[in-house]
Image: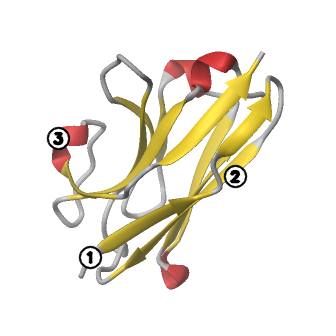
Amino acid sequence: QVQLVESGGGLVQAGGSLRLSCVASGCTINGYTMGWFRQAPGKEREFVATIKWSGSSTYYRDSVKGRFTISRDNAKNTVIMQMTSLKPEDTAVYYCARHRAIFRDSLSGLDFGYWGQGTQVTVSS
């Protein structure tokens, strides 16, 4: 059974930091682009960051550039997103996802086939 399990969410004050982890089981992340997406209440799900299957490139939405860092550890089947200087507008449920196809890259959630259950991030002002 394929599972992506996120952890590390919580309540933090504006300006604080959180470290989200995503551990995959029942599948490998090696060779697959991994991504973090988020969905705030009443809003569409949006791309936050992805890391290419090779680990050579990372992509971020403009609003998180310079504050969030995505990384991967293929040996541990884990993806991490370090979030700093958090803002109230970062409040959302954050989802980890694995691309559908090996050795492919994308920023669209439609191209990601496996999703975690999400972890809540709440940033208070």
Using the rendered image of the protein, determine whether residue 83 is visible from the camera's viewpoint.
Answer: no
Reply above or below: 72 against 90: below
The amino acid pointed to by label 3 is: Leu
The part of the image, by quadrant, that contains residue 76 is: bottom right
Badge number at residue 90: none
The part of the image, by quadrant, that contains residue 83 is: top right
- The residue tagged 1 is 2
- The residue tagged 2 is 19
Give the image location of residue 20, x and y in percent.
Answer: 62, 53
Q: State the SS at label 3.
A: helix
Q: In screen coordinates, is 109 left or right of 68?
A: left
10 Å crowding of disc 3: few (<14), some (14-19), many (20+): few
Tell me which label, 3 or 2, sits earlier in the chain. Answer: 2
- The residue tagged 3 is 110
Give the image location of residue 40, x and y in percent.
Answer: 44, 25
Identify the residue at image location x=25%, y=40%.
109
Give the image location of residue 37, x and y in percent.
Answer: 41, 39
Q: In screen coordinates, is 28 left or right of 101?
A: right
The reply to whether dot 2 and dot 1 touch (C-beta < 8 Å) is: no
